[in-house]
Amino acid sequence: MSNKKNVPKRTKPYLTGAVTDEYTLRNALKFFFMLLLIMFMTFLVCSMTGFQSAVLRIVVNTAVELLVLTVLYSKGADLGEEAVARGEILYQHEQKGVSISKNERMIPYHPAKGFVTGIIGSSILIICAVLLAATAEKQMTGAGVLPSWTDAFMRRTEFRDAVVQYAQPVSAGFTDFLRIAVRIMMMPFISLAGSENKDLLLLFEKLSPLFVLLPAFAYGAGYMQGPARRSRIHTEIAENARKRKVREKRARKARIPKGPQQLN
C-alpha cells in the first residue's frame, strides 16, 4: 500500500473578468495566424498520406486532426491559466484596497472568453465555410477531360455537335475558389474521404462550418481548464511545503541525542 497522503486541492480566490477585453483582438489574431500555420502543415502532411487503403487514411488523418485539436486545447489552457493568475493578483489588490480600473477588471478569466476568442480568430474561415455549405453541389467529371478515343467522333459532323460542349473549358467560379480554401482548412477530413468518394466529399462540404469551428471549440475547452491548472499548481506548492516541513522535522529529531549520555 502507498504511504503517500492525499493532499486536498488548494485554490485561491480570483476575480472573474468579462467575455472580451482589450487583449481579445490581439489574442484572436494570434489564433488566426496559428490556424494558418496549422493549415499549411496539415496540408503538407495530408497531401503525402493519400493512401489507397481506407483504413490507413482513417487512422492517419484522424491522428493528424486529434493532434491539431490537442495543440489548440493546450494553447487555450495556457491562456486560461494566465487569466486565472491575473484574477488572483487583482483579487489580492482589491482586498488591500488598491484601485482597479475597469479595463483591468475585464482581463481575468471568464469561462466563455476562450470560445469567443477562437470564433473571432476563425471568423473569416467560418464565413467561407458557410458560403460553401450553402452553394456546394456534387462534383461530376469536369469539362475538357474527354478520353482520346473520342477524337474520331469529333471528326464526324453528326457526333461533333453533341460532344463538343463537353470539351469546352469552363472557368472557375466563386464556389470553386471557396471549395479550394475550405478544403485546405479541413484537409484531414478531405484526405480521409478520398478523392473518389464524391458523395462523402459533398457531405463534408455541407458540414464544413462545423469542422471549421472545431479548432475554436478545442481552444475554448482548453481555456476553461485555467482554474483547474491553477488549482494543481497551488496543490503542488502545498505538497512541496508539507514535504519540506516533514524533512525539517526529521532533521531536528536526528540532531537530538538518544538515551542518557555517559559521564566521564
Image: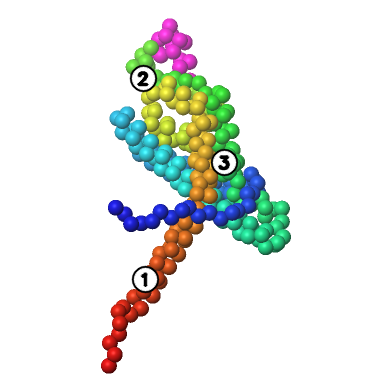
Of marks 2 and 3, which one's residue comes earlier in the chain? Answer: 3
Q: Is residue 198 above or below residue 19?
A: above
Dot 2 corresponds to which residue? 147
Report the front residue among 67 and 205.
67
Dot 1 corresponds to which residue? 250
Q: Which type of secondary structure does the marked residue at label 3 adopt?
A: helix
Of marks 3 and 1, which one's residue comes earlier in the chain? Answer: 3
Give the mark toward the camera: 2 or 3.
3
For image coordinates 44% across by 35% down, the residue present is 187
Q: Amino acid at mark 3?
A: Phe
The reply to whether callout 1 and callout 2 are in contact (CB within 8 Å) is no
For image coordinates 49% across by 57% down, the residue present is 234
State the CA–CA distance, disc 3 to disc 1: 50 Å
State the CA–CA distance, disc 2 to disc 3: 51 Å
What is the span of residues highlighted in magenta in the rendered image? 154-168
View extreme (top): residue? 158
The percent position of residue 152, horizontal first and vertical second, equals 36, 14
